[in-house]
Image (cartoon, rainbow, N blue to C red):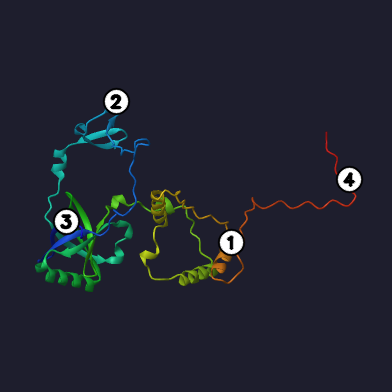
Amino acid sequence: MAPRASWKGYLKLSLVSCPVRLYPATSSSERISFNQLHKDTHNRINMKPVDPELGLVERADLVRGYEYEDKQYVIIDDSDLEAVRIESKHTLDIEAFVEESEVDVIYQDVPYYLAPDGAMAEETFVVLREAMRRSGKLAIARLVLSSRERVVTIGARDEGMFVCTLRNPNEVRSTAEYFRDIPDLKPDPEMLELAARLIEQKVTKFDPKRYEDRYEAALMQMIREKLKGHKPIHAAAPERGNVINLMDALKQSLGQGKPPAASKSKAAAKPAARPAAKQGAKPARKKA
């Protein structure tokens, strides 16, 4: 059964428009999740709101608060939200077209599929889809979802279109905070060549079915075994190997050299062995 459309409206490019429906492109319903139960009764626990001073409170007594400073709040009521509510025009109004490579993946948020709404819309939809496919560009448009305006990208995908909401720029963190301490090193040409050849050996076509979530699979198997009364299966973490010499590791990966030798720091190096005592020599007398 196809999921319900999360939005219904018109895709518009200048004077050309057609009715469309927006559908969620992904689902987390198959992801394993747990509920909290009481350890004795196994009844599911209801989370109730608690005030540190008053104790248990009614949900009807709760209000929204925005923390503008530490432990300092301004109260936001329904009329405040209504004042800034954006009225949905039910229109995906295309504002511009950009190169797909210009939209950094870090800005991509929630994916959707876009399909024509009814047989009468199909011809116009196909014309817009193929024009976008031929251009090789992504459309930038605005969409109101749940009273919030979202900037989205639109592109041709198979027989339909693919829509992705974009994160606001202030939601994306700068790389400088995390990468600034990485030294600007020039890689050794030979090591770089070995790494490039190693990458080339591993090139394949991406098939998501080959990369299942092994933890999720082990979790489901453990649940099945528990249902049968068996002991749970433990998914052991892979063991960490010794630190190895990078050049030896690259050569070993390509089948060119000996097994990589473990690297040793000066601090970890063993002290030099003392010369063997001469035969017949008396052991040194311990001091009292």
Q: Left or right of 253: which side holds 16? A: left
Instruction: Give the spatial CA distance, label 3 vs label 1.
Output: 55 Å
Q: Based on the displayed image, in which of its 4 quarters is residue 96 positioned?
A: bottom left
Of callouts 1 and 2, which one flags the residue occurring earlier in the amino acid sequence? 2
Q: Where is mark 4, residue-wise? A: 282
Give the crowd class for mark 1: few <14, some 14-19, many >=20 residues within 10 Å.
some
Between disc 1 and disc 2, the foreground one is: 2
Instruction: Give the spatial CA distance, label 3 vs label 4.
Output: 94 Å
Circle 1 SS class: loop
On residue 7, the disc is 3
Q: Is residue 284 above or below residue 135?
A: above
Q: Where is mark 2, residue-wise? A: 53
Give the crowd class for mark 4: few <14, some 14-19, many >=20 residues within 10 Å.
few
Could you tell me residue 134's position as x and y percent? 22, 74
Q: Are marks 2 and 4 in contact (CB under 8 Å)?
A: no
Between disc 3 and disc 4, the foreground one is: 3
Q: Amino acid at mark 4?
A: Lys
Could you tell me residue 278's position as x and y percent? 87, 52
On residue 245, the disc is 1
Q: Left or right of 249: which side holds 1? A: left
Between disc 4 and disc 1, the foreground one is: 4
24, 225: nearer the viewer: 225
Instruction: Give the spatial CA distance, label 2 vs label 3.
Output: 43 Å
Q: Amino acid at mark 2?
A: Glu
Q: Amino acid at mark 3?
A: Trp
Of callouts 3 and 4, which one flags the residue occurring earlier in the amino acid sequence? 3
